[in-house]
Image (cartoon, rainbow, N blue to C red):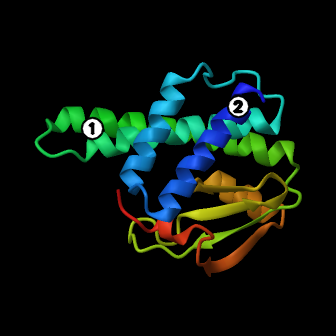
Amino acid sequence: MNAIQKYFKYRQSLIDQYKKGDMTKREYLKMNYDEVMNNDIRPFKNIDTVEKALYNYQYYNALAKQMKSISTERGMDFELKNDYREKSDYYYYKKDKATMKVLNMLDYRNMEAYFVKVRSKYLKGKLFEIVIPDHDVILHSTNTLILKNLRDEGVFTEGSRISLIDEYINHRY
């Protein structure tokens, strides 16, 4: 088993614990963040496999969520909060680049995408889910270019659905 596979196996064990109620969403996110920070894998510059692109997606998603979480802490100076928000936005941008790489590598085949029903007013009509069954993957984004490409490629279904991971998506952290 290579290092990427070990990471995904560990991540799946965290997801299983979260689903069972053995940890909160915040604990899951923190442990996933700690894992990507402490393992020997850094984001790939040369992404020549779907596995590497998916790792980059998870890596940048973990960083984005951690920076966003820190930015919501009380009593923090406005400029510092803003710095963390900007870092979060940057990591979400990098995550979306990894998403585009996955979609292009798979040539938009064997996937479906749709908006998800969310409790957040901010994310309503913006957050969409991309399901790639062949890789047992669910990706999320609000990126309008990705959305346009999914529509252009005929894999985006209009309307909104309950997310396949609704409990996770709609649970605040």
Task: Check residue 62 in the rendering and tell me which mark sits there, or answer none.
Answer: none
Kind of residue sitting beneath label 2: Ile
Which quadrant of the view contains residue 83? Answer: top left
Cβ atoms under marks 2 and 1 closer than 8 Å: no
**Is 69 displayed left or right of 35 in the figure?**
left
Q: In the rendered structure, which amino acid carries the disc numbered 1?
A: Asn
Q: In this view, does 118 lie above or below 86?
A: below
User: 134 or 82, which lies in front?
Assistant: 134
The residue where tag 1 is placed is 82
Q: Name the one closer to the observer, 98 or 32.
A: 32
**What residue is at 84 percent from the left and 61 percent from the top?**
153
Q: Where is residue 166 in the image (x, y as percent from the top left)?
A: 53, 71
Q: Quadrant of the N terminus?
A: top right
Which of labels 2 and 1 is toward the front? 2
User: Circle 2 sits on which residue?
Assistant: 4
* Residue at x-position 28% and y-position 42%: 71
Alpha-carbon distance for marks 2 and 1? Answer: 32 Å
Relative to residue 146, is residue 82 drawn left or right? Answer: left
